[in-house]
Image: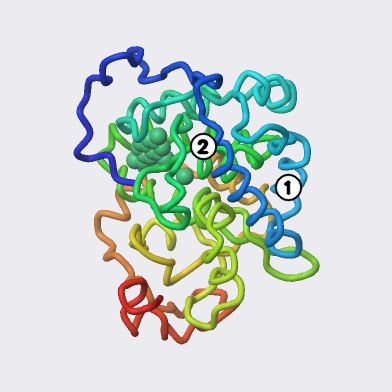
Amino acid sequence: MSADAMPTAPPPGARPDWTIDQGWARYTEAEHQVWITLYERQTALLPGRAADPFLKGLDALDLHRAGIPDFARINEELTRLTGWSVVAVPGLVPDEVFFDHLANRRFPAGQFIRKPEELDYLQEPDIFHDVFGHVPMLTDPTFADYMAAYGKGGQRALGFGHLHNLARLYWYTVEFGLMESREGLRIYGAGIVSSRAESVFALDDPSPNRLGFDLERVMRTPYRIDDFQQVYFVIPALQTLLDVTTQTDFAPLYRRLEGAKDIPIAAIEPADRVFTRGTQAYANAGGRTRAA
Ligand code: HBI
Ligand code: FE
């Protein structure tokens, strides 16, 4: 998500760090029902598709009980497991605010839930995307450390003027990442696991490329915010994410990126490890605007 056009002051009623009260008691029955519908749809699809750390986190948090989860209750378990907590925000927050939360192990989650008539597609991250999609992975100690390291890296990237490169790392891992497992590829990215259609497309569709993760390669690859991805990057294990963020010196990397061209979104490079050479049929046919 680009927060370029964000106002820099929090909206009325929000704190200086953009957080608000979740106000759990104020959700309506209809809003809880939207959560339950989405939760049941996704949990039916995810066994055999989602990576083990995601499914394990989902179990540990017991996000099902009474519809939309109460952050106070999630946080008891989440903080005990990895020191993370979830805080409520009205919607997208400015980059520096977002990174400050992550660096301090707070995940800002949208307080609102999508309308029943737009279950499948929405622009701003709502509580289902943020909590169902992101929070289970934050129960994994390695992923939890990676997200905090990303927050610190984001703060530095802003200083270097290279946030657009680092944002691609977030996009192709935290939001749309795939992972190897003994039984085949699995999804762990929040944008995939929270989407009915993309949970299938990301693994089964012949259209997208599926390529081995490489930090510099990913940082040179633009992404789609408005449709299914044309390329997914596959990590061998979560430890890879933590290793690349803690063992890479980003200052010289950003300097190299200044001289390097972006890689076209559907390209396959000689050095890529190819899991799937996609047909790009979906994107070439016009994607979302042509499908349905
Ligand atoms: N705010 N609430 C929210 N959620 C995000 O995922 C988010 C954001 N602000 C900025 C942002 N993401 C991105 O610019 C960074 O991931 C690069
Ligand atoms: Fe997200």
Which corner quadrant of the image does residue 146 belong to? top right
- Tell me which residue sits at (29%, 65%) in the image: 262
Label 2 and label 1: CA atoms lie apart by 28 Å
Apparent side of residue 244 relative to residue 237 in the rendered image (left or right): left
In this rendering, the answer to whether 171 lies above or below 205 is above
Dot 1: few (<14), some (14–19), or many (≥20) neighbours within 10 Å? some
Q: Nearer the viewer, residue 197 or 246?
A: 197
Q: Nearer the viewer, residue 288 or 253?
A: 288
Q: Nearer the viewer, residue 83 or 154?
A: 83
Disc number at residue 31?
A: 2
Apparent side of residue 17 relative to residue 68 in the rendered image (left or right): left
What amino acid type is highlighted by mark number 2? Glu
- Tell me which residue sits at (19%, 38%) in the image: 5
Disc number at residue 53?
A: 1
Query: SS class of the residue under badge 2?
Result: helix
Residue 251: x and y in percent read: 36, 41
In this rendering, the answer to whether 166 lies above or below 280 is above
Dot 2: few (<14), some (14–19), or many (≥20) neighbours within 10 Å? some
Q: Is residue 40 visible?
A: yes
Specify the quadrant that holds the C terminus: bottom left
- Tell me which residue sits at (56%, 61%) in the image: 196
Q: Is residue 251 visible?
A: no
Apparent side of residue 101 relative to residue 95 in the rendered image (left or right): right
